[in-house]
Amino acid sequence: MWASRRRFHARRSSRGGSAFLLAEGSAAPGPVPEGLVRVYSMRFCPFAERTRLVLEAKGIRHEVININLKNKPEWFFKKNPFGLVPVLENSQGQLVYESAITCEYLDEAYPGKKLLPEDPYEKACQKMVFELFSKVPSLVGSFLRSKNKEDRSALKEEFRKEFNKLEEVLTNKKTTFFGGSSLSMIDYLIWPWFERLEALELNECVDHAPKLKLWMAAMREDAAVSALLIDVKTFRGFLDLYLQNSLEACDYGL
């Protein structure tokens, strides 16, 4: 699509940054301007949203280049051999990929609010919660691929089991957030999948988890989260095209 009709599209974000969408046949972008970090992303990707949330939360000046994941530019594999987003690039040409790694890198390399705790035990606790959550992304993938009501019912039960583990963490900690009384790295790392529950018609899977529902409500009040929220109708429009393997899926709504 993009190779034949246009090389890229650019738009200004509400925070003054720019976002480009690049696909097969597009030229590679130039060097990252001094004082900025570039994130290669895709507007609807929950893994890339992790990185963008940390960029927003820490107030790091950045630009976004969105990659059409259904029609990737050839040069992108030089940024990440897996061909996946997110990828960070700085003005020295240094590249960092894999979502959790990019988030930890940003927290360590840039000043401002620290999202990971300094205390080794507290940091380990966050990583253990991350492991408790780890099955959820693959469950979402299985749910999207499921073809019949029976499969979906079984998967919903699996979601409930996984969410019970997270509910227990919040119950034991007696805090609003997974890292304590204030929002921290672990909250940003798992949030994107909870943001999508409504669009996926999976909200019922947290009905039994009152602490988790309160956490979700508190997350929506965060400035970084609210800045990146995707409305349900737009996400469903993207998803319909994505599941049809449409080359235009990643450009939905532009």
Image (tube, helix red, strand yellow):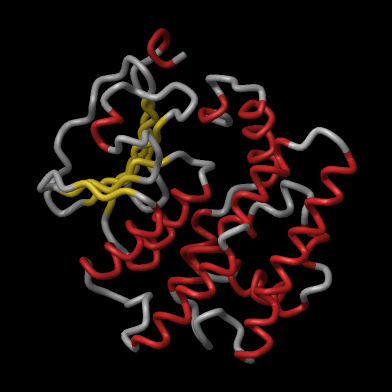
Residue nearer the viewer, 171 or 11: 171
- Is 120 placed left or right of 146 in the picture? left
Location of residue 68 (image quadrant): top left
In the image, residue 149 above or below residue 246:
below
Instruction: Give the farthest residue toward the top.
Output: 4
The residue shown at (81%, 33%) is 147
- Is 236 placed left or right of 76 in the picture? right
- Is 173 placed left or right of 16 in the picture? right
Instruction: Residue 177: give x, y in percent of width and height.
Output: 57, 80
- Is 154 placed left or right of 51 in the picture? right
Instruction: Residue 119: give x, y in percent of width and height.
Output: 34, 89
Residue nearer the viewer, 73 or 21: 73
The residue shown at (58%, 31%) is 253
In the image, residue 211 above or below residue 185:
below
Instruction: Residue 109: give x, y in percent of width and height.
Output: 21, 66
The residue shown at (51%, 68%) is 130
Q: Report the label total.
A: 0
In the image, residue 109 above or below residue 96:
below
The residue shown at (79%, 49%) is 201
In the image, residue 110 above or below residue 87:
below
Instruction: Residue 10: give x, y in percent of width and height.
Output: 36, 31
